[in-house]
Image (cartoon, helix red, strand yellow):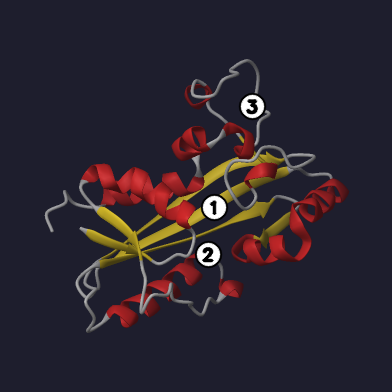
Amino acid sequence: MRILFATGNENKITEARAVLDPLGHSVEGLIIDGQRPDFDEPKHLGLAAVAQAKIDQALALISETEYEGAAILVEDSGIFLDAFPEWPGAESADVERQIGLTGIISRVNQAGDRGAEYRAVAILSDGAQQWQSDGVCRGQIANQPRGSHGFGYDPIFIPELSAEESSTKSTTEGPNELTFGELGPDVKNEISHRTKAMNGLARLLSAPSR
């Protein structure tokens, strides 16, 4: 299946390819007239509503174009802080731009609850059928940004690792204390919220035959 990923984030495309390419699907960025399209996003309605809005708009954009017949993939994700229910959520990127990672750490410190989780909603549609999968990665917020890998909140997010997942990182004694920014892409691509959502889509899809 030819899959057009409606995102301007190359890191997301790379992560999607890691899951879907081995199954025989091709993943590329959606580009219309040389540009990655902008979408109206009802962020106040949450991740699933944003993802669905993007799907609907992207399918309309490719209608009667060379891309018609391809499937559209969208993924919307955000970080959710236990101390502030449903925040920053779908507005995570905006909040990061406004107050930065140090601003997030400051608010978490004041609240006294470091618990957090990344959530992702992935939707794939070929216009006739639609598949949706969610992914969650639990963890906590670090006391300072650490590591140069990843993007977004990765330098301050410390994921909880199961015993099996711990075997993929260099230090396996005790609970994980490394951020996604320190663990690097090999570990993140095994356990991230986005990978879980993409793996869910892969399970929902029939054997590729298109």
The label number, if any, that marks residue 144 in the structure image:
none
Foreground residue among 35 and 55: 35
Q: Hey, which quadrant is residue 133 in on the image?
A: bottom left
- Contact (CB < 8 A) between labels 3 and 2? no
Which marked residue is nearer to the observer: mark 3 or mark 2?
Answer: 3
Q: CA distance from mark 3 to mark 1?
A: 19 Å
The label number, if any, that marks residue 119 in the structure image:
1
Q: Among all residues in the image, which is located at the extreme front?
A: 34
- Contact (CB < 8 A) between labels 2 and 1? yes
Judging from the image, what secondary structure is the residue with disc 1 in?
A: strand
The quarter in which the C terminus is drawn is bottom left
Q: Is 147 left, or right, of 43 in this rendering? A: right
Q: Position of residue 33 (x, y in %)?
A: 36, 79
Foreground residue among 175 and 209: 209
The label number, if any, that marks residue 47 in the structure image:
2
Q: Position of residue 45 (x, y in %)?
A: 56, 73
| Three-letter code for the amino acid on which mark 2 is drawn | Leu
Q: Hey, which quadrant is residue 96 in on the image?
A: bottom right
| Three-letter code for the amino acid on which mark 3 is drawn | Asn
Q: Position of residue 104 (x, y in %)?
A: 77, 53
Vertical arrangement, residue 61 with respect to residue 54, above or below: below
Q: Which residue is mark 3?
A: 176
Judging from the image, what secondary structure is the residue with disc 2 in?
A: helix
Q: CA distance from mark 3 to mark 2?
A: 28 Å
Q: Residue at x 38, y 75 (%)?
A: 34
Which marked residue is nearer to the observer: mark 3 or mark 1?
Answer: 3
Q: Residue at x 49, y 24 (%)?
A: 168
